[in-house]
Amino acid sequence: MTRREPAVDLGDERELLEAWLDYYRATALHKCAGLSPGQLVTRSCPPSPMSLIGLVRHLTEMERVYGHRLADPATPLLYCTDDSPDGDFDDIDTTDVQADLDTFAEHCVQSREIMAGLPLDGRVRWFYLYLAKEYARHLGHADLLRERIDGTTGE
């Protein structure tokens, strides 16, 4: 995923929504770059159960709920189950980190394709904005988690 901040004069509403969402998606991966699997599963802000890989898994779930369900309303969650409702954050393991990152990237591509193929009506617009809200919120968490892990700050 290429991380480029959208241009001010980008174009129409859909182009702008897609560009900002793609930027946020790439930023989530950027926050994980250069860290070991052990660092990615580190819950660096106790007592919070959040870790960087947990955030990636949570954002994958958001892509499924607010992207994939536009095409198939029966799309199930991937990490969160009846037995583990917070499985995106709780059921993490260093051996799964690369698979989790790959799954996230694949889900972002699928969501983008699904959303781009639909008219920008009220529901689709709402899903774009809700996903952007989720990313904006959780990228702030990622900033703090990353700083606590290795001191890295910034966008």
Image (cartoon, rainbow, N blue to C red):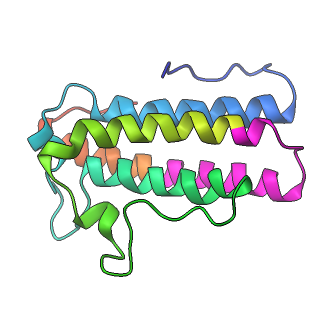
Nearer to us in this view, 42 or 90: 90
- Residue positioned 30% across, 54% down in the render: 54
In the foreground, 3 or 66 = 66
Residue 114 in the image, given as x and y percentages of width and height:
71, 41
Quarter where residue 119 is shown:
top right
Residue appearing at x 64%, y 66% in the figure: 74
Judging depth in this view, the residue of 126 and 37 nearest the camera is 37
Residue 56 visible to an observer of this rendering? yes
Q: Main secondary structure of the magenta part?
A: helix
Side of 36 relative to 119 (left or right): left
In terms of image quadrants, where is residue 154? top left
Q: Is residue 121 magenta?
A: yes
Residue drawn 64% across and 34% down?
Answer: 20
Question: Which residue is outermost to the left?
Answer: 38
Residue span colored magenta:
114-137
Q: Going by the image, does 13 lie left or right of 63?
A: right
For the C terminus, the image quarter is: top left
Q: Is 70 included in the stretch rendered in magenta? A: no
The quarter holding residue 147 reads top left
Tag count in the figure?
0
Q: Is residue 149 visible?
A: no
Q: Position of residue 59 (x, y in %)?
A: 46, 51
